[in-house]
Amino acid sequence: MNRSLWRGEEAITSRKSVSSNNSFDIAIIGGGFSGLWSAYHLKKIQPSLTIAIFEQNYVGFGASGRNGGWASAEYPTSSTRLIKEHGLQIYQNLRRDLTQSIDEIGQIARSNKWQIDYAKGGALVFATNKAQLTRISSEIDDEHRFLNQGQAQELLNVANIKGGVFTPHCAALNPFKLTQEIATYLESVGVEIFENSRVEQISDKQIEVNGHTITCQTSIRATEAFTSQKWSANQQIPIYSLMVATEPLSADVLSQIKNTQRATFQEACHLITYAQITGDNRLAIGGRGVRYKLFSRLSGRSEIDNRMHNALQRRALSWFPQLQGTKFPYRWGGPVALTRRWQCYLNYDPKTGQAAIGGYVGDGVTLSYLVAKNLALKINNLKTSDLPFIDQKIGTWEPEPIRYFAINAGFKATVAADIEEKITQHPSLIAAVIDPLINR
Ligand SMILES: Cc1cc2nc3c(=O)[nH]c(=O)nc-3n(C[C@H](O)[C@H](O)[C@H](O)COP(=O)(O)OP(=O)(O)OC[C@H]3O[C@@H](n4cnc5c(N)ncnc54)[C@H](O)[C@@H]3O)c2cc1C
């Protein structure tokens, strides 16, 4: 059963769905962070705007309600490529705005008394072998500091930890609660939210929902990995990320694990893993590796993969042997959108009134806030910062089945690179070959 920890046990009461034609200044498609934050920023700039959000299921149904809860300053494109393609100034603007956005989310939550279990404890990438340590040691910059074995273990008591890299720029939070709090706030300032309302068509200044026509000055497509292929023309594909979570941990186990500041953490593997200790004292851990489906098919089956979920549990036990015997009652997953050049996007055409944002790969918790904020500025004809995602071409994926074979071979090579490092204790040669091909 696909049961996200964040959503909890309570049944969801649906909001109204679209049942007649209507008209709004702004029509937003998608009730995840991108859609919700777009409405939030637009209302802040121009409170008189009439705004409606159309969500095919319920608010927080997508990745926004199911993710790892890292409000990080991570960005999908590598810094080397960003600097090469956009220059140092734009790269620095991005770093500044991303790190500030983490604090802004925290401030908005605090000032509105949102209960989202926000804790800005930073993020730790730790090494469990010499090869990982060599790699992460070379990634130190002014946002990251190196921790030797003792310092890293003092922060997080992982078995076999060899050292780590720490950044203060990350907060742990409960993402589903955040979606619900933003939605409730938006309704209190007059935004209309329609659920069970699937948008079938987007054209200039109008959309079609549940067989009804909604006219608008501007439409914002914020549908991320769920974007219909007819709208994205092979520009983005869904990749699944899966998670498990434990029962609440005892005070004794928690004190052995340490991490009282709730830093988020991950092992420096090539195949991505990520974890946090939740506000209610559980370990929630996730990772990638589910096979990509031919023709970018979304599949509920990809969200529950026993092999992957069991591997995540084993990984948790290898980090924290004291979890032996602990139950993992929650297993779930969801899709993230991967663009060919690992580039997220903000496109807005004032002539047609059509806008689209997304493509965050797995880094959308903070990034969607920043992208939506800049979209709101653009729609209101206000100056935005110079940032690498504004009005950029994101490229298209290779045709099938080349795409299918290449992506799944990439996953296999990534797993092999981690095994290679464990055996040789040297940075992987396989990774050195595939990294340039991935074109990050
Ligand atoms: C398991 C997992 C772990 C992750 N961990 C992290 C993390 O720790 N940190 C991080 O930064 N990022 C993480 N991510 C990525 C992050 O969750 C996403 O980048 C972010 O939530 C995207 O927000 P969104 O609003 O753009 O998309 P979504 O939240 O996917 O929202 C899109 C919404 O659009 C709706 N929709 C689609 N089509 C239509 C239509 N035709 N009509 C109406 N509605 C429609 C969908 O139902 C959905 O609710 C993770 C993702 C997953 C799946």
Image (cartoon, rainbow, N blue to C red):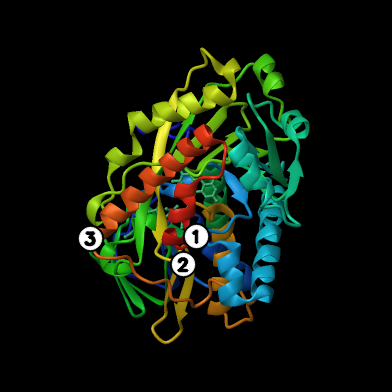
Please say if the residues under marks 2 and 1 sit with CB atoms less than 8 Å apart: yes
Give the numbered dot on residue 400: 3
Q: Amino acid at mark 1?
A: Ser
Can residue 288 be seen by looking at this rendering?
A: no
Foreground residue among 324 and 189: 324
Please say if the residues under marks 1 and 3 sit with CB atoms less than 8 Å apart: no
Which quadrant holds the N terminus? Answer: top left
Ligand 1 under 8 Å from disc 2 Cβ? yes
Q: Amino acid at mark 3?
A: Glu
Q: Residue at x 60, y 55 (%)?
A: 74
Question: Alpha carbon of mark 1 to alpha carbon of mark 3: how far?
Answer: 29 Å
Q: Is residue 343 left or right of residue 380?
A: left
Q: Residue at x 33, y 75 (%)?
A: 206
Residue 46 lies, in percent from the top left, at 60, 74
Ligand 1 under 8 Å from disc 1 Cβ? yes
Q: Which residue is mark 2?
A: 357
Nearest to the eye among marks 1 and 3: give it.
3
Please say if the residues under marks 2 and 3 sit with CB atoms less than 8 Å apart: no
Give the numbered dot on residue 34: 1
Dot 2 lies on which element? strand
Of mark 1 and mark 3, the one earlier in the sequence is: 1
Residue 375 lies, in percent from the top left, at 54, 72
